[in-house]
Image (cartoon, rainbow, N blue to C red):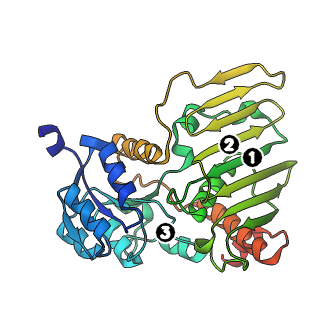
């Protein structure tokens, strides 16, 4: 109990569908965190979670954050969350972990960059931050790979598969995560051709409305290409990255890593067991890393920087391609929104 009292405090904001997952995550975090508040719509599942965690229950996010300010807030849902709420949270120094992207277009992304920024200030001066979880680039497998870019060489073919069971992240969240990962190994695509296999006949209007399975072919300059397969309706949750270059071939999953030369000889691999690699395990892994490496004043990570903007443009090009049935240019979308 003494150890738990010294743990950082955390609040939760969830809806009925994500309440069990939020509870499982807090149980997995154990004494690393001290939950002090649970918020969300007035439904039985959220009320039960507050009772299980022995926390106060709140129906208003901003009031909860004023009454019970905490070092961390888990946003399992964006229902009932406004930009003003997010601004207040990062201004007071809270690290907000969100399962869903808080912006769904380039204008929203630009506005998110300014959350908590006061007149004459900059994003680096904001005490809090917003972190999407779980991202592939913070998984045990990816972190074990260090930086194999120099060994890979040129002429790269990149494939990324991200599958999730219902309730393990939206298709949009997985697509944005996929593009952030892929753009770490390729140039910006010249064209993107996407096909959606979903439950609805009509193409969705927004990225948040995407559901089902999405197949993407991207053509980059300098003899590079990428294939993405993303789903929020899979039987199994997991992510796999493959990069084939002139000098080596790389394979990374949530929990494994291997690098081979063109002759098939193993150059490097993960040598330790990272433990379980389920969806909640990846959430807990990234949260523990944030606990171990808290942001210091003036060191706010560039969560909404250039790479995030390029990834968002690629997501929007996917959506537009689904709607038009034609390849679309993410570069043009970026230029139109400058």
Of callouts 2 and 3, the N-terminal one? 3
Question: Of 69 and 4, which appears nearest the observer?
Answer: 4
Q: Residue furthest left?
A: 2
- Eyeballing the image, is 235 above or below 75? above
Q: How many C-alpha atoms fall within 10 Å of the one at disc 1: few (<14), some, or many (≥20)?
A: many
Is disc 2 placed on a helix, strand or loop? strand
Q: Which mark is residue 102?
A: 3
Q: Residue at x 23, y 62 (%)?
A: 50
Left or right position of 179 against 188: left
Relative image position of residue 60 (x, y in whole percent) = 27, 77
49 relative position to 130: left or right: left
* Position of residue 80 measured from the top left corner of the image (x, y, whole percent): 38, 77
Marks 3 and 2: in contact by CB < 8 Å?
A: no
- Residue 133 higher or lower than 289, as above or below: below
The quarter of the picture where the C terminus appears is bottom right
Q: Is residue 33 left or right of residue 147?
A: left
For the N terminus, which image quadrant? top left
**In the visual, does 10 lie left or right of 161?**
left
Q: How many marks?
A: 3
Q: For mark 2, what is the residue?
A: 241
Q: Position of residue 244 (x, y in %)?
A: 79, 37
According to the picture, the residue beneath numbered tag 1 turns out to be 159
Name the disc covering residue 193, or none: none
For marks 3 and 1, the one nearer the N-term is 3
């Amino acid at each position: 109990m003494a150890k738990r009292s010294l743990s950082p405090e955390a609040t939760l904001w969830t809806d009925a569908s994500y309440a069990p997952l939020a509870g499982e995550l807090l149980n997995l975090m154990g004494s690393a965190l001290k939950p002090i508040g649970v918020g969300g719509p007035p439904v039985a599942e959220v009320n039960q979670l507050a009772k299980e965690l022995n926390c106060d229950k709140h129906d208003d996010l901003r009031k909860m954050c004023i009454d019970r300010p905490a070092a961390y807030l888990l946003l399992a849902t964006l229902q009932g969350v406004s930009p003003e709420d997010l601004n207040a949270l990062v201004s007071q120094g809270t690290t907000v972990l969100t399962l869903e992207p808080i912006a769904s277009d380039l204008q929203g992304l630009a506005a998110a960059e300014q959350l908590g920024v006061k007149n004459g200030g900059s994003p680096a001066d904001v005490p809090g931050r917003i972190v999407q979880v779980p991202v592939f680039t913070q998984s045990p497998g990816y972190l074990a790979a260090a930086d194999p870019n120099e060994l890979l060489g040129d002429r790269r073919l990149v494939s990324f598969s991200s599958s999730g069971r219902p309730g393990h992240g939206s298709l949009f969240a997985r697509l944005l995560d996929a593009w952030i990962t892929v753009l770490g190994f390729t140039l910006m695509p010249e064209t993107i051709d996407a096909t959606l296999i979903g439950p609805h006949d009509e193409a969705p209007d927004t990225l948040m409305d995407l559901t089902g399975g999405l197949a993407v072919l991207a053509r980059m300059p300098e003899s590079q290409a990428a294939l993405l397969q993303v789903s929020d309706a899979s039987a199994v949750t997991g992510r796999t990255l493959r990069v084939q270059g002139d000098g080596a071939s790389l394979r990374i999953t949530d929990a494994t890593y291997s690098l081979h030369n063109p002759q098939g000889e193993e150059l490097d691999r993960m040598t330790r067991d990272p433990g379980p690699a389920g969806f909640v395990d990846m959430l807990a892994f990234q949260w523990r890393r944030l606990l171990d490496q808290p942001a210091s004043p003036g060191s706010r990570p560039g969560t909404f920087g250039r790479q995030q903007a390029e990834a968002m443009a690629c997501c929007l090009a996917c959506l537009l391609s689904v709607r038009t049935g034609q390849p679309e240019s993410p570069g043009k979308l970026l230029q139109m929104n400058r």
